[in-house]
Amino acid sequence: MLRRFHIVDVFSETVHAGNPLAVVRDAAELATEAMQDLAREFGFSETTFIVSDPRAVEAGVKVRIFTPAEELPFAGHPSLGTAWVIREHLAERRVDAVTLALGVGAVPVRFEAEAGGSEVAWLTAPPIEVGARIPASRIAPALGLEAEDFDPALPVQHVQAGIGFVFVPLRGLDAVRRGRLDLRAFAALAGEGLPAQVYLFCREALDPANDLHARMLFAAPDVREDPATGSATACLGAYLLEHRAMGPGPLSLRIEQGFEMKRPSLLRLCARDAAPGRQIEVGGRVIETARGELV
């Protein structure tokens, strides 16, 4: 059976920017091992597989997400990109929202028109847990940074939404650019259950229209950098609300990422405290760049 796939750039303002994603259709009969092999073959940060009826946009379309190394219960740019493919190519009609059934449960994605005819896809984040703080002095050697590189007003902290990240607030662009991830030096923290997924950010941005600059370094299994990380941005929303880092909220922020990789990305974040819990949305544009068939 020939299976079709689409490649889209997510959180991209122009073609060949943002975070690329491969979306494989009609994947219900693919074995887990075959999905992992295909994710490794594509080589993107993530590849998704649509494994249930894509017309069930309201009840929830079951989707599996794989990095080149493992399956994930949730990820941001795969959710947005897959929902876009379902809406544009597989749904019975062009709907305003698509619900995905992921490992963390139902993840709604809605589509909103902007001035000028462009469109932003927004996901509603699953529940987020703000976890343990880590002394900056303990993580600095693993990042090749010094004590004075860290923002003294905010803590280094573990935050997770199905997948976890270590958030590292830094003083400025120079420190963010110098950051690296040394897995040997990080090993002691990993032994305590902290993920080797480190999100560096600062309040200084390259574009004055943006609010934050970020990089995300992770092990898969070697160290890689992600051009745009929607799940981490969702967790960032909870982190910023927790510490009132950008005021009491609600927050409406523009976050730039991927510039160090020459994959400039723009992620939009809306976050607010509301009963029964925080409401966090992450948005970005989706641009299709290729489509084809697996053989």
Image (tube, rainbow, N blue to C red):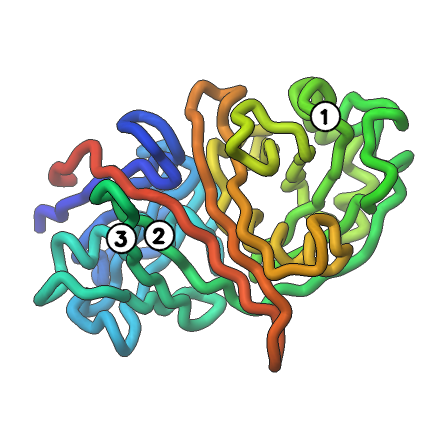
Nearer to the camera, 12 or 185: 12
Secondary structure state at the residue bearing disc 1: loop
- The residue tagged 2 is 80
Residue 84's tag is none
The amino acid sitting under disc 3 is Ala
Q: Are marks 3 and 1 in contact (CB under 8 Å)?
A: no
User: In the image, 18: left or right of 259?
Assistant: left
Residue 120: image x %, image y %?
Answer: 33, 49
Secondary structure state at the residue bearing disc 2: helix
Q: Are marks 1 and 2 in contact (CB under 8 Å)?
A: no
- The residue tagged 3 is 113
**Earlier residue among tags 1 and 2:** 2
Mark 1 Cα shell of 10 Å, populated few (<14), some (14-19), many (≥20): some
Residue 172's tag is 1
Q: CA distance from mark 2 to mark 3?
A: 15 Å
Instruction: Please identify, in this view, whether the residue under mark 3 or under mark 1 is nearer the observer.
Output: 3
Nearer to the camera, 1 or 138: 138
Mark 3 Cα shell of 10 Å, populated few (<14), some (14-19), many (≥20): few
Nearer to the camera, 277 or 103: 277
Q: Residue at x 83, y 40 (%)?
A: 188
- In this view of the protein, can residue 295 be seen by the observer? no
